Structure formats: structure tokens, C-alpha cells
Image: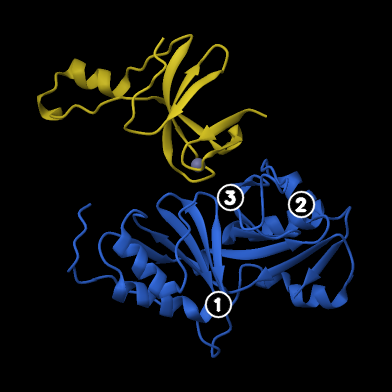
Chain colours: A blue, B yellow
Amino acid sequence: MSDVKNETATVSVMNQLPDASIVGQSPLFHADLATIAKKGPNTGGVSFKEEALLGHITLRMNADNAEQMSVVEKVLGVALPTQPLTSVSQGDVVVRWISPDEWLITVPGLQAFDIETAFQQNMIGHYQVVNVSGGQTLVTLSGKHAKDVIKKSSPIDLHPSEFPVGKVVTSVFAKSSAVIRRSGEETFELVIRRSFSDYLWLWIQDASREYGLVVEA
Amino acid sequence: MFLIYCPHCGEHREEEEFHNHGQAHIARPLDPDSCTDEEWGNYMFFRKNPKGLHHELWVHAAGCRKFFNVTRNTATYEIKEVYKIGEQPKVVE
Ligand SMILES: [Zn+2]
């Protein structure tokens, strides 16, 4: 567990997201959300959108290590949130507090490999960076009744006094799990597992039926 | 709703997010090779099962995935205190 500073990185990094020459398939690719969005309806109480093929990176390190913290800020352009259950965003980069020594970073898909590589080249000491882009996806629920759909699915208290914009929790969601972040008064981002994405897509359609579901693409 | 305070997240969360991992403060013998069978057996298999105050290890399984300790009354389910790994309980009787 010692912080060895001059260790040569022996990890191999792999670009998990292909360039435009290969068709990338997000976990909800099979649902063909683009066609559903075109067919409508266009109005309803809940809107659903998959932010497909984002780059997802987990970072584990010691938040008390000032040198590591400054490297992160240099790589991401934004400081890690150390306050529990908070997130920070800067442009397209969002950093979510997951646990006292773990963060989930989402970036535009084609930047993930560059950021992973920048960590490998600049980070010092004992840490872990893993590109988990292939294992999960991010969906947003927005609109007047978005919070009602989440209330049916998770025990989290969503009252604005308890769950302000920017807060992030990892919790159970419809017998699966999700990293839930409030990105706006009526907008929530859910990071869900690839293997549960079809099930949760079906669940969300069912749970939002009474409010009217609008699919965006 | 049965709410449990996670000292890492810093807020109360629903019981469903947590798992109980049994008795806390079980020290692994420093030199397993020189343990008697009885000492090793007690370490591996024998656990307290009190009716009343119990110091337990819990994990915020669906949340931050960190472990912490809970002093709990096993008869009333009342949680007397929550404290981090490495700390000692304040409520002992
Ligand atoms: Zn927690």
C-alpha cells in the first residue's frame, strides 16, 4: 500500500470504444430507440433518453493525497468531489462521488481512451483507473413525473431538500442497482449495468405508462 | 422503512441497501501456524448470538460498498451507534 512514486506503469490500456469505422452498439442498441422516438408520442410526463456510448471510467485513490488530487485536476480539468454524495461537472465531463475512495467519471465516448492514457502517464502512487464503458450505460429520465418513476423503483428520498441538483447516490433500483444523479430540477441520470439495461428499459416503460412516456433519441 | 446511518455516505438509507456480516471485532490470529485446533476453530466458526446488545459488521452493499460497525439490540432492532472500522464501540452495556 506504499505510495511508490517512480514506479513504471506496466498496465496495458485498451481502447474499448471503436472509432467511426466500426459500429458501436450501446446496451440498448437492440431497442432501436431512434425509431421509437420518431413514432412518438412527443408529449408526456416522463422523457427517456439513452446517452449511448459515453466513456465511463472508475477512479480509485486516496482523496487525502494532495499530489494525486492535483494530477486528477490536471487530467480532467476539474477537481474531484470529496464531499460524500456530490458530483461536479465541467463541460462534458461529469465526476460522481461513489465512495470515499472511488469516483465515476463520464466523458464523451471518444475521449475515454485519451483520459485513461493521461492517467496512466501522469498519475503517481497507489491508484486504479479502469475503463468500464462497455459494462454500463447512462440513461436520463426527465419531466414532471420523472421523480415519480424513480420513487416507484428506489427507496431514495427525492425531496429537493434531501436530493438537490448535483447530488448522486448509488442505490437499489427496481431490484437492480443504479447510480442516480440529479442533473436538473426535473432531470435524473441513471448509470445502469449493461446486463440489466433491457430489463430496466422494460421496467421504465411500465412504470411510466400512467404518466405518458416520451422516448428521445 | 428501517433506516440505517452509513458513516461513509453520511446519511440514513433504507435497510434494503445494507447487508449484515455478523459479529464485529473478530481478530485473526497473528500466527495461525501456532494455533491449537480449538483456537483456530473458535476464530473460524464460533460466533456470539446474544439476545440484546450486539456489535456487528455491516456493509452498505448497494451504496458505497464500504464496511462499518453497528451496535444493535437484537431483540428490539434498535441501533445504539454506528462507528467506522478500526474504532471501538462506546455503547458496551
Ligand atoms: Zn454508504
Which percent across, then down, holds residue B92?
39, 13
Is B35 left or right of A86, judged from the image as shown?
Answer: left
Q: Secondary structure at mark 2?
A: helix
Is A98 left or right of B2, judged from the image as shown?
Answer: left
* Chain ID at mark 1: A
Q: Are marks 3 and 2 on the same chain?
A: yes
Q: Secondary structure at mark 3?
A: strand
The numbered disc on residue A86 is none
Query: In the rendered structure, which disc, 1 or 2, sits on the residue that comes first in sequence?
Result: 1
Q: Measuring 88% from the left and 63% from the top, which residue is drawn there?
A: A44
Contact (Cβ within 8 Å) of mark 1 with mark 3:
no
State the separation of the CA atoms marked 1 and 3.
22 Å
State the separation of the CA atoms marked 1 and 2.
26 Å
* Chain ID at mark 3: A
The amino acid pointed to by label 1 is: Pro
Residue A170 versus residue A38 in the image, above or below: above
Q: Which residue is mark 3?
A: A169
The numbered disc on residue A108 is 1
Which percent across, then down, holds residue A30?
68, 71
Query: Could you say which quadrant of the image residue A15 lies in?
Result: bottom left
The amino acid pointed to by label 2 is: Lys
